[in-house]
Structure formats: structure tokens, C-alpha cells
Amino acid sequence: MSGHSKWSTIKRKKGAADAKRGKLFTKLIKEISIAAREGGGDPDANPRLRLAIANAKGNNMPKDNIERAINKATGSDADQYHETTYEGYASHGVAVFVECLTDNTNRTVSSVRAAFTKYGGSLGTNGSLEFIFERKGVFNIKLDEHVDEDEVTLEIIDGGAEDVTSEDGYLHVTCEMSDFGNVQKKLEELGIESENAELQRIPNTLVTLNDTDFSSVMKLIEALEDNDDVQKVFHNLDITESQMELI
């Protein structure tokens, strides 16, 4: 399995675990809100909103929730969110990249720094992890049993994908950030809905830890993910199947 597809598998399984704990809907609503506020409430004319809605539907968010989020974001009393990122290291040399949507950056940086400090990590300067992470487009597609996998794979590659692999009934599609829109358009032309599609920060190298050290690092990652201002947490921690069960 390529490094990109392994990372995609880790993120998909971790996302499923997060959804079970009810963490996901709040983050999806915030993404819908900022997309609607910045680009308008019509998904046909707003690619970011269209993607946010697709991801919400892929995670079984009710239609009413989606519509309420759009209506609130385009109203006069809409929350004013700002996008910001933080970079640092957890214990044992694990790189951690944090993406946030916040209405108070002072509160957010304070809480993110406190989490790093509490769990033995250190917050660094922006740009310090550029050599570790690549920005890539990632699509996770649940395969229909009637779909010709080889034919679909060729079509997606023709649409701009650089890597397509299959595992556990899913297609993992990776593309350059600049080709994200092209691949999304190709999938729409094929009538294929992604369970999840997003720009991710994919690590070039992974750090393998024993279960004890893994659990220590996960305390920081989960503390960050529990932060209401945090949208996504990327890291270069390799996670085994047995460690996934510990989450």
C-alpha cells in the first residue's frame, strides 16, 4: 500500500470513530457555515459549499441541519469565523498540524498551546512543518458492488488523480491540490458521490510507536480534536490495526 493510501485509510477509520462519539457534526456545520458566508448559499455557484454539503451527507447529517446551517450563515446574525493554523510536535517527535475555525483567535491559540504543553508537546512557528506534510486532495469512495472498479479507476485518473487504490470496499483517490476541482468534477460527471472529500496534509514520513507511547501522543491529538475551535488535526503518527482499537 502506498504511503498516501495508508494515510487515507488511517484518516477514514479515525473519522468513523470520531463520528461515533458525536464530534463530527459540529465541525461539519462550521465548514458549511464559513463556506456559505464567504461564497453564498447556492451550492451550484459555490464549490466549497457544495463539497461541505457532500461531506455532511456522506456522514449522514440530516438535510434540515444542513439547511439551517446555510440559512444562519447567510443571515445578518451569522457567526464570524476565521481560519487559522498551528504547527508543533507531540512527544516522541510526532509532527502535528492543526487547522482551526474560530471567532476568537486569542482564545484559540491559548487553548491549543495549553494542550501541547499539558501533554508534553511544543507549539512551533508556522511553516516549520512544511517539509513533513504535502497538501493533497483526498477522496474516499464507498464502492457499489455493481461498479466496474477498473473502468472507474481509469476515468478518475483521466480526470486528474495521481493515485487510486482500493481497500475494504473503498476507493482511495489522491490528487495534487491544484487538481482537486478537476477530480471532483469528474466524479460528478460519473455520478459518483464521495463519502468524504477534502484537502488533507499528508505526511511524507510516518512515526511508529509502541502502544504506551502511542496512547500518550493520542491524548494530545484527542484533546485538540475535542477543542470546539479545531476543525482538523493532521499528524505523522503511524497507527496499526491493534492501536486503532485503542482509540
Image: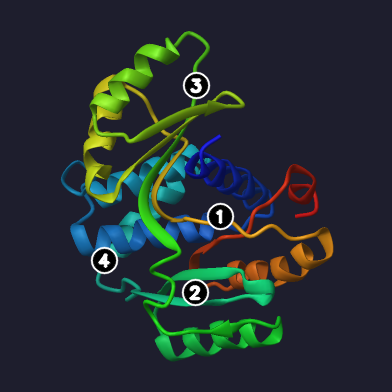
Q: Which amino acid, by three-letter code, is at mark 3?
A: Leu
The x, y position of residue 5, in whole percent, is: 51, 39
Q: Is residue 21 left or right of residue 47?
A: right
Q: Which of 40 and 94 is in front in this view?
A: 94
Residue 47 vs residue 54: left or right? left
Can see residue 63?
no
Check disc 2 and give the amino acid type: Asp
Q: Do the residues labelled 4 and 3 touch (CB within 8 Å)?
A: no
Q: At 53% from the left edge and 56% from the top edge, which residue is drawn?
A: 205
What residue is disc 4 on?
Answer: 75
* Residue lying at 31% horizontally and 57% vertically, measured from the top left: 71
10 Å neighbourhood of mark 3: few (<14), some, or many (≥20)?
Answer: many
Viewer-side label of 3, 1: 3
Q: Earlier in the sequence, mark 2 or mark 3?
A: 3
Between marks 4 and 3 in the image, the one whose residue lies nearer the viewer: 3
Give the distance between the C-alpha atoms of the residues marked 3 and 1, in whole angstroms.
23 Å
Please tell me whether mark 2 or mark 4 is closer to you in this view.
2
Residue identified by numbered label 2 = 229
Amino acid type, mark 4: Gly
Q: Callout 4: helix, strand or loop?
A: loop
Labelled pair 2, 4 in contact (Cβ < 8 Å): no
User: Which residue occupies the extreme left position in the image?
Assistant: 45
